[in-house]
Amino acid sequence: MRRRWIVAGAIIILIAAAGKWLDYHTSRYDYIISQAAARNGVDFHLVKAIIYEESWFRSNARGLAGEIGLMQITKAAATDFSVHKGFPPVDAARLEEPELNVEIGCWYLRRSLDRYKSSPQPVLYALLRYNAGESRSDNWLRIALKNPLPGSPTDEYYLSFVDFPKTKAYARRIMHRARNRNYWY
């Protein structure tokens, strides 16, 4: 009987420790995210959902196409940021710095939201641009606008024109996570 209590206690301690670690892992950049999101006028939860999807809160994450850091910033996006802000070029190694990475990511997201502000789903098209690029996102928007649906179409209607299954799933997951504010799974 005593052994069962010890095992039960050990399991409870492990679960509590795992929960504490998960909470720390998913919230340690909240201050940086909130500051950059506020400066760029983007939703904190949307940015956090993108970070969850892109890097799972790992500042040293590297993508297959050379993306770097929490928000998987490309060298091209960093250069664009530097030019528009009048800053010196950003060294690729600095893109692992959470503050800079999240600032560039929020700036890029703001530009995407501004680009699609008159579209039927600005957040969705901004996410499509973030993942698949501007020309593809513009093309999907053009197709959707040529095929109007009466009433108020849902995200799924607009996603039906996205012919990249991974991009479609990416946008779905981020929008779901941002709406539900769940970063644990």
Image (cartoon, rainbow, N blue to C red):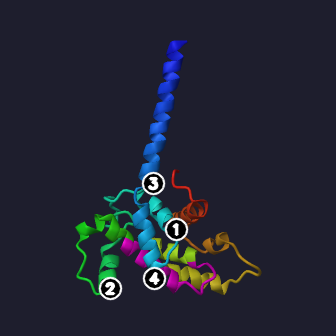
Residue plotted at (59% across, 62% down): 176
Task: Confirm or deny contact between disc 3 and disc 2 (CB under 8 A).
Answer: no
Q: Nearer the viewer, residue 51 or 12?
A: 12
Q: How crowded is mark 3: few (under 14 residues within 10 Å), some or many (20 or more)?
A: some
**Residue 79 in view:** yes
Residue highlighted by disc 2: 85
Number of numbered tags placed on the structure image: 4
Mark 2, secondary structure of its residue: helix
Q: How crowded is mark 1: few (under 14 residues within 10 Å), some or many (20 or more)?
A: many
Of the numbered discs in the image, which one, if any, rests on residue 46?
Answer: 1
Mark 2 vs mark 4: in front: 2
Along the horizontal axis of the image, is 170 left or right of 69? right
Residue highlighted by disc 4: 111
Query: Which amino acid type corresponds to the residue marked 3 in the rendered image?
Result: Thr
Mark 4 vs mark 3: in front: 3
Query: Which amino acid type corresponds to the residue marked 4 in the rendered image?
Result: Arg
Q: Nearer the viewer, residue 103 or 54?
A: 103
In terms of image quadrants, where is residue 98? bottom left
Mark 4, secondary structure of its residue: helix
Query: Looking at the image, is mark 1 or mark 3 earlier in the sequence?
Result: 3
Query: Which amino acid type corresponds to the residue marked 1 in the rendered image?
Result: Leu
